Image (cartoon, helix red, strand yellow):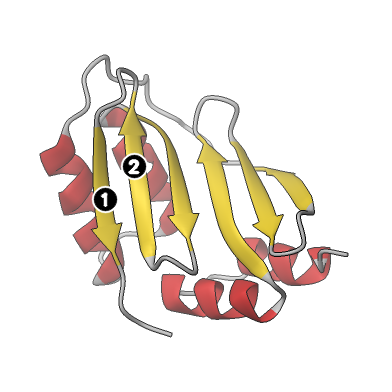
Amino acid sequence: MINVDVINECTNKKLSFPEVIQHLSQIGIERYYTDLIKMEKTYYSHNGESYVEHISIDNLPTLANNFDEVTVIESIHASQKGQIDYHTFIRNIIAAGTVCYTVYIDGKQVVYVGRKGESHTENFHFT
């Protein structure tokens, strides 16, 4: 059974991305999918279970028609450097045309996707 308390802790505390990945990995989460249209995250465990959580962020921008990969990359780097918080990051990538992203914990990568299937893959090397 998925440990929802740990997922809620990752959501409600201001943890860094590496801390989130470490906590989720410890409870057997292999990946999570973030739907920026529905504003939901779906967590998938190694044993096939899943858990859906609503994302609550105020003042969301209009989703851009075109995927602006440069802005997505700039937002990723600003977030990694602690220059912007998670809510600002989400607003930025929505404004840049991102409809969803998937974090592959075991694969150590995040794939950001636009409306027409455009994508950017960002690798991470901690944990």
Secondary structure beneath dot 2 equals: strand
Task: Report crowding for label 2: few under 14, some 14 to 19, many 20 or more residues within 10 A (C-alpha).
Answer: many
Query: Mark 2 sits on what residue?
Result: 112
Of the numbered discs in the image, which one, if any, rests on residue 85?
none
Q: Is residue 63 left or right of residue 120?
A: right
**Outermost residue to the front:** 47
- Which residue is drawn at the image coordinates 36% and 82% (left, top)? 126
Name the residue type under label 1: Thr
Depth check: 86 or 70 in front? 70
Left or right of 106? Residue 71 is left
Q: Position of residue 19 (x, y in %)?
A: 51, 79
Q: Position of residue 84 (x, y in %)?
A: 31, 59
| Contact flag, marks 2 and 1 (Cβ < 8 Å) | yes
- Name the spot of residue 106 as percent of width and height, x first: 49, 69
Tell me the quarter of the image containing the N terminus: bottom right
57 left or right of 99 in image:
right
Earlier sequence position, callout 2 versus callout 1 = 2
Q: Position of residue 93 (x, y in %)?
A: 31, 39
Question: The disc labelled 2 sits on which kind of residue?
Answer: Tyr
Distance between the alpha carbons at the discs numbered 2 and 1? 6 Å
Q: Quadrant of residue 55?
A: top right
Image quarter hosting the C terminus: bottom left
Rendered residue at 25%/65% (across/down): 83
Q: Which residue is mark 1?
A: 121
Look at the numbered disc 1 and give the secondary structure of its residue.
strand
At x 44%, y 77%, the residue is 18
